[in-house]
Amino acid sequence: MIRSLSRTLGAVIAAVACWLWASAAAASGFADFDADRETILHGRALPKQAPVAGEADVVGPWTEQDGQLDLGTEEATGNRFWLVKAGVGDVADGLVRARLKPGKRIDGSVIFRAQAGIDLKELSGYALAFDVDSARLMRWDKGTVLPIGPEAEIPRLQRASSIEVVIYLVGPQIIATVYDGDTFDRLASLAIHETTYTDGRVGFRAGKKAEAMQFGLLSVMDTRTPAPKPKGSGRYGAVKRYGLDADPGTTPFGNTRFVFVPESAVGSLPRELRKGVEARLRGDDGAKQAVVFTDTVGFERMKRMGIEVLAVDSNVPWKTFDPAYRKYAAKAPVASGRGFRLDLSYKNVEMVEALLRGYQAKYPDISTMVELGRSHQGRPIWALKISDNPEADEPEPAVLLNGSHHASELLSVEYPLDAAAHLLENYGRDRQVKRWVDDLEIWVVPMVNPDGNWMFLEESRFASRKNGRDTNLDGFYDPFEGIDLNRNYPLGWGQTPGSSGVTGSKYYRGPHPLSEPESWAMASLADRLHFAAAISFHTVGNAIFLPYTVADTEPPSPNVPFIIAKQMEEAGLEQPNKRFIKARANGYPVSGSDQDWLMHAFGTVAYIVEGSHHNPSLEVRARAIAATRPVWQTLLTRVHSGPRISGHVRTADGTPIEAVVRVEQIQLRAGERWTARARDGRFDRLVATPGRYTIEAKAPGYAPATVEVKVRGATSVDITLDAA
């Protein structure tokens, strides 16, 4: 156990050393006092702690009062030592912390791994020694002291009201850092490799030149004593390791901290910490709180100042900083005109369901809700089907608009919701909208990934992309687990670059294609409908991505998706970031995306449309939605009006056949095999231009059939196959 802990701490110290030497003086991280693991041998670390009056062997005059060791008034002729009793605070590998006040003149040391006989003047061990403007690591050998490392100049040392020392020890590796005790700015870093003394006592030394110095906190963390472990099983233990109600002793992620304090405490914060106030909200008890974004340094300063801390974490949810969401999350949709207000806040899965139900209730003749499946955590995946006869399976082209494959992309939910609202609210008022709804089946799925959305909004800002699968099977889902749903579809699944087989990666593709209930639900819908066209909305990229994004996979020729994407690009308006959404035929490699699979499996002209922003202000959200609306409208018009070849493949008695339907003028270059759909034998093929086309249908047990059609706009053709 000791060796294992030492090796682990050694790796940490090596990383810390590199960081210390490479960084500027101002610290972004600090070895904050850990009350659960550090043993206080003298003094106090936090204001509310009772001071410890340590038991020590001493040389020379010392006085102790309220956790401070003073040198007293008696003049000393040489070094004075204050060394914790043997066996009380010994340390081998671990951490030593000390707090000093320079006084009028600093001349003293923090002693560690010390060994002494009856006479402390024959001390052996190590010390971090301070003079007026410098610090240096020293070795004592039976009373003889020698420097064992370079001197670190600290011009501000004598002017500091206090300094704090943190010394890391692993085997022969010794790293000492010196901080300003008030600001925790790093003043110096020293590191040596020294093999003489492996363990021993800790304490203080005051030199004969010291004047009005004080020695306060002295604590140790000896890794020979294992740290407390959380109860439970699994890699980390089956406990909640993050969030405002996390189990005691858990550690937030990284250096950043969100510190919740009473709003009344903000005025007591130093100016630089007040600048970090990022949110004001009310706690569960109704009391006003402020959320301060800071780092470990700022948090340690708050603790040392005695600021009341209500909660601290790095893993706060989106809702902490979004008062509009907090206001509307638990409320019913707000009615407005012919529909509902969509611009009041971003939305979770429950809000999306309430809106879809509200619209279906308002427009029952042209819409119906369909539950496509359930997520890992049991949340429904809802679709709103919009058509003039929504309860029937009509022989019409189907179009899919979906959002939120990725957890944190809140704006991606808003695009399909806007489409549904626009179609329903303007049906009967806008001729073009009426034609779309009457002649197409439009499926709107605003939230493909309800678990990830909920995690991001309600539990953790670290939930960036993935779904709610408990990938390490410890009975607890954290924001780094899950599957990237847009790497889980069959085409190209498993390829790299474009996805990852590492479970912790944000691009983790899952154990096998369609392993996730969310992607399975979407794939099942597509298999039943064979969409003519589809858009999967995402955020940030200002782009219309075309199939194929799988490396070394050639799209059909002519490239109909590219031709239509250019029309969509031209229709789009200027985005709030002063840019336009552009068609991109060669995006970054993606393996296992929905758009690629839809195109390859069914001939769907499928796109990923990435909006201008991630999760912007509500005002920017509204402008982004309006600027993107012509993009999906152009696609609906292109599907509705063509040029398009649609038809059915049946037997002579009208039985539908799931035949392979090929347009000879379209060269397929990736092994595509596009069939008519099983439910009615229907197929839909968007083509590049009007003209003459040859259609071939094949199915096992039937003689192939070929027909020629002249395509102007939306052209229909029925094909009959006879038994072979």
Image (spheres, rainbow, N blue to C red):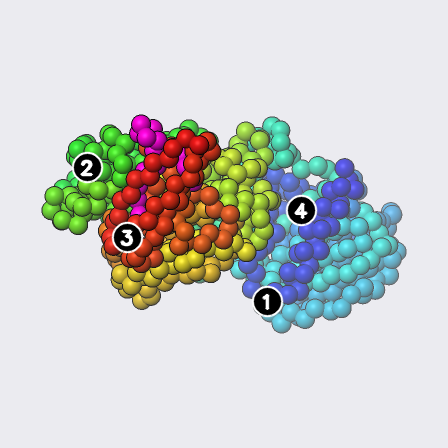
Q: Nearer the viewer, residue 251 or 210?
A: 251
Q: Which mark is residue 24?
A: 1
> Looking at the picture, how far across and down is residue 637, in whole percent?
24, 52
> Looking at the picture, how far across and down is residue 711, in whole percent?
28, 53
**To which residue does mark 4 refer?**
219
Relative vertical location of residue 586 with respect to residue 705 in this rendering, above or below: below
Mark 2 to mark 1 CA distance (whole Å): 66 Å
> Looking at the picture, how far across and down is residue 457, in whole percent?
39, 42
- Earlier in the chain: of badge 3 and badge 1, it is 1
Mark 3 to mark 2 CA distance (whole Å): 28 Å
Mark 4 surroundings within 10 Å by alpha-carbon count, few (fewer than 14), some (14 through 19), many (20 or more): many
Q: Nearer the viewer, residue 717 or 197?
A: 717
**To which residue does mark 3 refer?**
710
Secondary element type, mark 4: strand
Let me know if residue 652 is in the magenta part.
Answer: yes
Which quadrant does the C terminus fall into?
Answer: top left
